[in-house]
Amino acid sequence: MNGNPDAAPSRAAWSVAPVVDWLLREGRLSAEPRELIDTLAAHLLGAGAPLWRLRLGFFTIHPQVAAWAYVWMRGRSTHVEQFPHGVQKTGAYIGSPAQRMIEGGAPVRYRLDHLSPSDHRLLHELAAEGGTDYALFPLRFSDGSRNVFALATDARSGFSAHDLAQFEILSHAMSAVLEVAATHRIAETLLDTYVGHRTGGRVLQGQIQRGTAETLHAALWYSDLRGFTPLTERLPTQQLLAMLNEYFETVAAAVSAHGGEILRFVGDAMLVVFPADANGGPALACGAAVESALDAFARLAPINSRRRQSGEPEIAFGVGLTAGEVAYGNVGSPDRLDFTVIGPAVNRAARLESLTKELGVPLLMTAAFAKCLGRPVRSLGFHRLRGLAEPVEVYALENAA
């Protein structure tokens, strides 16, 4: 192919049948939508379709993203577009070809060389880049939702009736294939959101049998907000939730930046794991946990300055850090499981966090953690931790308050 759609021989004779055959046999096996759309476009061009631009868009379930779109253009790299929640109320959607197609439930077409000033800006942008014809077909999913399959050409004569008929045939096959890909992506997103990327990957791989576990060497973090219980009594619900989310967002950003994964939120508490195998060994895992805590404290400083000025309660929290061997796997009832870590290191991290309140030090660690840390620490003596028969020596960073 020379890339010029006008040079394709006998356009009216091209058939989408081999493209559909490839899609149902091989294309559906592609786990990455970007790869799928690249190969699909190549097959369409190879079949003789007058294709200049191709776009697949679908709505999803994601805490920050309402919809994804993958856009291929001849001679360019495929790029991904993300649309935030509320996009349906913006000018990007209102009056757009996608809105007309989704709400009408039928294919729509625009001749880009015969636009009026009132037509949506997307159409004018496509025309300015050289497009001559634009067609959209609904991708109907089994839940009744409609997603977007859009094609554009820069052929001087635009799309023929034969072109549009072939594309509509393709759209039905695309619906089935894209629904599977979209469902898989939604499953990944939901698991990442609710149980974390590491755990979510294991669940998708089928590690869901109760009692199965692996031994994991890791640094463990347990943190808790200061004064949260009194705040629940006096703050309005929305203000309390906003404070919690600001705290979680700030700490999560610091933890993620240093290779940690949040395993669970327990009210206002967080359990975080820094696997030694993913962080270069125990010393680096412990270092990553400490750097995460210091990073989180630093990130909260300007936030608390702003909260003080606005009369809002400051966000303060304590962290207990331990290191050791834990069991990482499934526990629960036969039909309701939790993928978590279990072991003495987890319990000690939680007990240490409670001790930070008594000692007035925001970050405490066990002797095992301090030994592998490789930075100056100081002993705060032996203290009894609830549930342990013998006192435990507790450490803080050398320069900590």
Image (cartoon, rainbow, N blue to C red):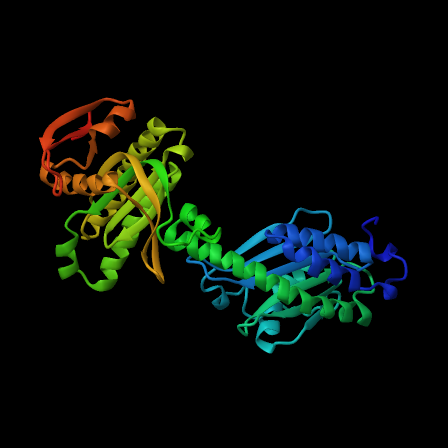
Is 390 in front, or is 111?
390
How many numbered discs, if any?
0
Q: For this view, does 53 lie left or right of residue 295?
A: right
Can residue 264 be seen here? The reply is yes
Where residue 283 appears, x then y in whole percent?
Answer: 33, 26
Write the residue at 15% across / 43% down: 354
Vertical side of 104 occupied by 342: above or below: above
Residue projecting furthest to the right: 10
Write the residue at 62% across / 72% down: 101
Is 13 in front, or is 176?
176
Is 167 in front, or is 20?
20
Where residue 230 appears, x then y in whole percent?
Answer: 12, 56
Residue 41, quarter of picture: bottom right
Vertical side of 164 occupied by 185: above or below: above
Check the picture and name the quadrant holding the C terminus: top left
Write the residue at 15% across / 56% down: 231
Can residue 125 be seen here? The reply is no
Where residue 290 appears, x then y in whole percent?
Answer: 29, 32
Q: For this view, does 12 lie left or right of residue 102?
A: right
